[in-house]
Amino acid sequence: MEYGEERGGMTGTELKLLAMASMALDHGAYVLLYPLTAGDEALYGFYLALRAAGRLAFPIYAFLLVQGFLHTSGKGRYLARLCAFALISEIPFDLAIAGELVYPGAQNVFVTLAAGMGTLWAMERWGRDRLFPSALIALAGGLAAELLRADYGLQGVLLPAVIYLFRRDPAARMTGELAVLATLLRGPRDIPCLLAVPITERYNGRRGPRLGLWAYWFYPLHLLAFLGLRMAAAAL
Protein backbone atom coordinates (compact mmCIF):
# COMPACT_ATOMS: atom_id res chain seq x y z
CA MET A 1 0.00 0.00 0.00
CA GLU A 2 1.38 3.35 -0.99
CA TYR A 3 1.15 5.40 2.19
CA GLY A 4 3.58 7.84 3.68
CA GLU A 5 5.09 7.89 7.14
CA GLU A 6 3.45 11.13 8.24
CA ARG A 7 2.91 11.86 11.91
CA GLY A 8 -0.87 12.13 11.74
CA GLY A 9 -3.41 9.51 10.82
CA MET A 10 -3.86 6.08 12.36
CA THR A 11 -1.48 3.18 12.79
CA GLY A 12 -2.37 -0.35 11.82
CA THR A 13 -2.83 -1.25 15.47
CA GLU A 14 -5.22 1.65 16.03
CA LEU A 15 -7.28 0.53 13.04
CA LYS A 16 -7.29 -3.01 14.37
CA LEU A 17 -8.47 -1.91 17.82
CA LEU A 18 -11.25 0.14 16.23
CA ALA A 19 -12.33 -2.89 14.20
CA MET A 20 -12.28 -5.09 17.31
CA ALA A 21 -14.41 -2.60 19.26
CA SER A 22 -16.87 -2.29 16.38
CA MET A 23 -17.14 -6.06 16.07
CA ALA A 24 -17.71 -6.45 19.82
CA LEU A 25 -20.57 -3.95 19.72
CA ASP A 26 -22.14 -5.79 16.80
CA HIS A 27 -21.87 -9.25 18.31
CA GLY A 28 -22.81 -8.09 21.79
CA ALA A 29 -25.98 -6.55 20.41
CA TYR A 30 -26.90 -9.69 18.50
CA VAL A 31 -26.11 -12.23 21.22
CA LEU A 32 -27.27 -10.29 24.29
CA LEU A 33 -29.85 -7.72 23.19
CA TYR A 34 -31.68 -9.18 20.23
CA PRO A 35 -33.49 -11.89 22.24
CA LEU A 36 -34.87 -9.14 24.49
CA THR A 37 -36.09 -6.73 21.81
CA ALA A 38 -39.50 -8.26 21.07
CA GLY A 39 -42.16 -5.65 21.81
CA ASP A 40 -39.65 -3.10 23.13
CA GLU A 41 -39.18 -0.38 20.52
CA ALA A 42 -36.64 1.61 22.54
CA LEU A 43 -34.44 -1.42 23.13
CA TYR A 44 -34.79 -2.43 19.49
CA GLY A 45 -33.65 1.03 18.42
CA PHE A 46 -30.61 0.74 20.67
CA TYR A 47 -29.94 -2.71 19.24
CA LEU A 48 -30.04 -1.32 15.69
CA ALA A 49 -27.66 1.51 16.66
CA LEU A 50 -25.12 -0.97 18.02
CA ARG A 51 -25.41 -3.17 14.94
CA ALA A 52 -24.86 -0.07 12.78
CA ALA A 53 -21.67 0.72 14.72
CA GLY A 54 -20.59 -2.85 14.03
CA ARG A 55 -20.65 -2.29 10.27
CA LEU A 56 -17.23 -0.63 10.43
CA ALA A 57 -15.45 -3.83 11.42
CA PHE A 58 -15.21 -5.95 8.30
CA PRO A 59 -14.09 -3.24 5.83
CA ILE A 60 -11.28 -2.34 8.23
CA TYR A 61 -10.29 -5.99 8.61
CA ALA A 62 -10.27 -6.35 4.82
CA PHE A 63 -7.93 -3.37 4.57
CA LEU A 64 -5.65 -4.80 7.26
CA LEU A 65 -5.63 -8.18 5.53
CA VAL A 66 -4.10 -6.51 2.48
CA GLN A 67 -1.57 -4.70 4.67
CA GLY A 68 -0.59 -7.98 6.30
CA PHE A 69 -0.32 -9.71 2.94
CA LEU A 70 1.93 -7.00 1.52
CA HIS A 71 4.27 -6.90 4.49
CA THR A 72 4.44 -10.46 5.81
CA SER A 73 7.60 -12.46 5.22
CA GLY A 74 5.69 -15.73 5.41
CA LYS A 75 2.49 -15.83 3.39
CA GLY A 76 2.07 -19.56 3.98
CA ARG A 77 2.24 -19.11 7.76
CA TYR A 78 -0.21 -16.21 7.55
CA LEU A 79 -2.72 -18.28 5.59
CA ALA A 80 -2.26 -21.27 7.91
CA ARG A 81 -2.92 -19.05 10.94
CA LEU A 82 -6.15 -17.75 9.40
CA CYS A 83 -7.26 -21.31 8.63
CA ALA A 84 -6.43 -22.46 12.15
CA PHE A 85 -8.50 -19.72 13.73
CA ALA A 86 -11.32 -20.41 11.28
CA LEU A 87 -11.49 -23.91 12.80
CA ILE A 88 -11.10 -22.66 16.38
CA SER A 89 -13.82 -20.04 15.94
CA GLU A 90 -16.48 -22.09 14.17
CA ILE A 91 -18.19 -23.61 17.19
CA PRO A 92 -18.33 -20.28 19.12
CA PHE A 93 -19.64 -18.63 15.94
CA ASP A 94 -22.31 -21.28 15.36
CA LEU A 95 -23.46 -21.09 18.97
CA ALA A 96 -23.61 -17.30 18.83
CA ILE A 97 -25.53 -16.90 15.58
CA ALA A 98 -27.70 -20.01 15.57
CA GLY A 99 -27.59 -21.53 19.03
CA GLU A 100 -26.30 -24.77 17.53
CA LEU A 101 -23.02 -26.59 18.04
CA VAL A 102 -22.71 -27.17 14.29
CA TYR A 103 -24.54 -24.85 11.91
CA PRO A 104 -23.73 -25.42 8.22
CA GLY A 105 -25.69 -22.38 7.05
CA ALA A 106 -22.88 -19.88 7.70
CA GLN A 107 -19.15 -19.88 8.39
CA ASN A 108 -17.19 -17.42 10.52
CA VAL A 109 -15.26 -14.43 9.25
CA PHE A 110 -11.88 -16.17 9.48
CA VAL A 111 -13.06 -18.40 6.63
CA THR A 112 -13.71 -15.24 4.62
CA LEU A 113 -10.32 -13.77 5.48
CA ALA A 114 -8.57 -17.04 4.59
CA ALA A 115 -10.36 -17.09 1.24
CA GLY A 116 -9.34 -13.47 0.74
CA MET A 117 -5.73 -14.23 1.62
CA GLY A 118 -5.62 -17.13 -0.81
CA THR A 119 -7.13 -14.92 -3.49
CA LEU A 120 -4.53 -12.19 -2.95
CA TRP A 121 -1.76 -14.76 -3.16
CA ALA A 122 -3.13 -16.07 -6.45
CA MET A 123 -3.51 -12.51 -7.76
CA GLU A 124 0.12 -11.78 -6.90
CA ARG A 125 1.36 -14.94 -8.59
CA TRP A 126 -0.82 -15.08 -11.70
CA GLY A 127 -2.58 -11.72 -11.94
CA ARG A 128 0.58 -9.62 -11.69
CA ASP A 129 -1.45 -6.38 -11.36
CA ARG A 130 -3.20 -6.94 -14.69
CA LEU A 131 -6.90 -6.12 -14.48
CA PHE A 132 -8.47 -8.99 -16.42
CA PRO A 133 -6.68 -12.00 -14.88
CA SER A 134 -6.82 -10.40 -11.43
CA ALA A 135 -10.56 -9.84 -11.78
CA LEU A 136 -11.11 -13.47 -12.79
CA ILE A 137 -9.06 -14.70 -9.83
CA ALA A 138 -10.96 -12.42 -7.44
CA LEU A 139 -14.30 -13.63 -8.82
CA ALA A 140 -13.22 -17.26 -8.42
CA GLY A 141 -12.17 -16.60 -4.82
CA GLY A 142 -15.44 -14.82 -4.12
CA LEU A 143 -17.50 -17.67 -5.56
CA ALA A 144 -15.54 -20.10 -3.38
CA ALA A 145 -16.47 -18.01 -0.34
CA GLU A 146 -20.11 -18.14 -1.44
CA LEU A 147 -20.00 -21.91 -1.79
CA LEU A 148 -18.47 -22.19 1.68
CA ARG A 149 -21.18 -19.82 2.98
CA ALA A 150 -18.49 -17.67 4.54
CA ASP A 151 -19.46 -14.46 6.29
CA TYR A 152 -19.86 -11.64 3.69
CA GLY A 153 -19.45 -14.21 0.90
CA LEU A 154 -18.50 -12.87 -2.53
CA GLN A 155 -18.11 -9.28 -1.34
CA GLY A 156 -15.91 -10.41 1.53
CA VAL A 157 -13.28 -11.53 -0.99
CA LEU A 158 -13.83 -8.84 -3.61
CA LEU A 159 -13.21 -6.06 -1.08
CA PRO A 160 -9.59 -6.98 -0.21
CA ALA A 161 -9.01 -7.88 -3.86
CA VAL A 162 -10.00 -4.35 -4.93
CA ILE A 163 -7.86 -2.78 -2.21
CA TYR A 164 -4.87 -4.85 -3.34
CA LEU A 165 -5.33 -4.37 -7.08
CA PHE A 166 -5.67 -0.58 -6.82
CA ARG A 167 -3.24 -0.12 -3.94
CA ARG A 168 -1.21 2.49 -5.86
CA ASP A 169 -4.25 4.51 -7.01
CA PRO A 170 -6.14 6.03 -4.05
CA ALA A 171 -9.05 7.37 -6.15
CA ALA A 172 -9.63 4.04 -7.89
CA ARG A 173 -9.18 2.16 -4.62
CA MET A 174 -11.77 4.22 -2.76
CA THR A 175 -14.21 4.04 -5.68
CA GLY A 176 -13.84 0.27 -5.85
CA GLU A 177 -14.24 -0.15 -2.11
CA LEU A 178 -17.39 1.97 -2.02
CA ALA A 179 -18.82 0.07 -5.00
CA VAL A 180 -18.30 -3.30 -3.31
CA LEU A 181 -19.65 -2.07 0.03
CA ALA A 182 -22.70 -0.55 -1.65
CA THR A 183 -23.77 -4.05 -2.68
CA LEU A 184 -23.90 -5.00 1.01
CA LEU A 185 -26.38 -2.28 1.93
CA ARG A 186 -29.71 -3.73 2.98
CA GLY A 187 -31.00 -0.78 4.95
CA PRO A 188 -29.99 2.29 7.02
CA ARG A 189 -28.25 0.05 9.56
CA ASP A 190 -25.62 -0.90 6.98
CA ILE A 191 -24.73 2.61 5.79
CA PRO A 192 -21.91 3.11 8.37
CA CYS A 193 -19.84 0.47 6.56
CA LEU A 194 -19.15 3.18 3.95
CA LEU A 195 -17.46 5.29 6.62
CA ALA A 196 -14.74 2.65 6.95
CA VAL A 197 -13.28 3.78 3.62
CA PRO A 198 -12.28 7.31 4.69
CA ILE A 199 -11.17 5.88 8.03
CA THR A 200 -8.75 3.41 6.44
CA GLU A 201 -7.50 6.13 4.12
CA ARG A 202 -6.13 7.79 7.25
CA TYR A 203 -3.68 4.92 7.67
CA ASN A 204 -0.26 6.50 8.15
CA GLY A 205 1.88 3.58 7.03
CA ARG A 206 2.98 2.60 10.53
CA ARG A 207 2.13 -0.75 12.11
CA GLY A 208 2.05 0.43 15.71
CA PRO A 209 2.51 -1.77 18.81
CA ARG A 210 2.11 -5.48 18.14
CA LEU A 211 -1.01 -7.18 19.44
CA GLY A 212 0.25 -10.62 18.48
CA LEU A 213 -2.12 -13.56 18.55
CA TRP A 214 -4.41 -11.76 20.99
CA ALA A 215 -5.94 -10.00 17.99
CA TYR A 216 -6.88 -13.45 16.66
CA TRP A 217 -7.99 -14.98 19.94
CA PHE A 218 -10.25 -12.00 20.58
CA TYR A 219 -12.74 -13.27 17.99
CA PRO A 220 -13.67 -16.66 19.48
CA LEU A 221 -13.15 -15.53 23.07
CA HIS A 222 -15.44 -12.52 22.90
CA LEU A 223 -18.16 -14.70 21.32
CA LEU A 224 -17.80 -17.20 24.15
CA ALA A 225 -17.90 -14.39 26.71
CA PHE A 226 -21.17 -13.06 25.29
CA LEU A 227 -22.62 -16.55 25.22
CA GLY A 228 -21.62 -17.03 28.85
CA LEU A 229 -23.31 -13.77 29.82
CA ARG A 230 -26.48 -14.76 27.98
CA MET A 231 -26.58 -18.13 29.74
CA ALA A 232 -25.94 -16.51 33.11
CA ALA A 233 -28.75 -14.00 32.53
CA ALA A 234 -31.13 -16.79 31.48
CA ALA A 235 -30.34 -18.70 34.67
CA LEU A 236 -31.33 -15.79 36.95
Image: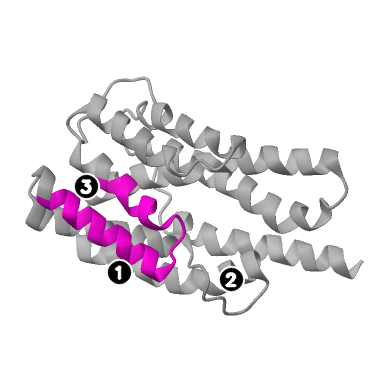
| Residue 104 appears in the figure | yes
Mark 3 element type: helix
| Residue 13 appears in the figure | no
Q: How many residues crowd around disc 2 within 10 Å: few (fewer than 14), some, or many (20 or more)?
A: many
Q: Foreground mark, 3 or 2? A: 2
Q: Residue furthest right?
A: 236
The secondary structure that dominates the magenta segment is: helix
Label number found at residue 94 = 2
Percent x, y of residue 119: 23, 58
Callout 1, which amino acid? Answer: Ala
Image quadrant occupied by the C terminus: bottom right
Mark 1 or mark 3: which comes first in sequence? 3
Mark 1 or mark 2: which comes first in sequence? 1
Percent x, y of residue 184: 46, 44
Span colored in magenta: 133-161
Image quadrant occupied by the N terminus: top left
Q: Is residue 130 left or right of residue 73?
A: left
Which residue in the protein does label 1 denote?
80
Q: Identify the residue at horizontal 57%, vertical 79% (top origin).
A: 102
Q: Is residue 159 left or right of residue 29?
A: left
Which residue in the protein does label 3 denote?
71
CA gap, disc 3 to disc 2? Answer: 32 Å
Callout 3, which amino acid? Answer: His
